[in-house]
Image (cartoon, helix red, strand yellow):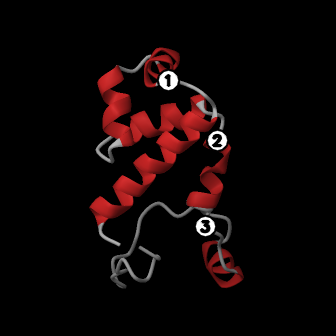
Amino acid sequence: MTDKGIAAELGHRIKSLRLRKNVTQQQLAEATSLSLNSIKSLESGRGKLTTLIAVLRELGVLHDLDNFIPEPGISPLQLARMRGKKRQRASGRHQTSKEDIGW
């Protein structure tokens, strides 16, 4: 699926969720302190990430973000090498493609 196709699908799902909760675009805009145009853009697949977060929070599904992008785990070998240090940056040695991360 293309990036535009994924964005359109996300917008469609947001719209479906809003309709299932019987909330108008105007009501959602007011509840999130966003403009009506921001809500319309999001539902058409052209919204901003901050708009998406605000809408997911208002519709009560922000907690599902873990299903969307799970918290990455650390392998025992990486943990032993790091000795409790939190990783600060990527090495750039291995180029990750979109296919490697599931996109």
Mark 2 or 1, nearer chain start: 1
Q: Is residue 48 left or right of residue 88?
A: left
Locate residue 87, reporting x and y percent. 52, 64
Q: Nearer the viewer, mark 3 or mark 2?
A: 2
The residue at 61%/72% (across/down) is 82
- Rate crowding at label 3 as few (under 14), some (14 to 19) or many (20 or more) other CA atoms within 10 Å: few
The total of numbered circles placed on residues is: 3
Q: Is residue 98 left or right of residue 71?
A: left
Residue at the disc numbered 2: 61
Residue at the disc numbered 3: 72
How far apart are the alpha carbons under marks 3 and 2?
20 Å
Q: Secondary structure at mark 3?
A: loop
Disc 2 residue type?
Val
Q: Secondary structure at mark 2?
A: loop
The one nearer the camera, 10 or 91, is 10
Q: Residue furthest right?
A: 76
Locate residue 90, reporting x and y percent. 40, 70
The label shown at residue 24 is: 1
Locate residue 12, reporting x and y percent. 44, 49
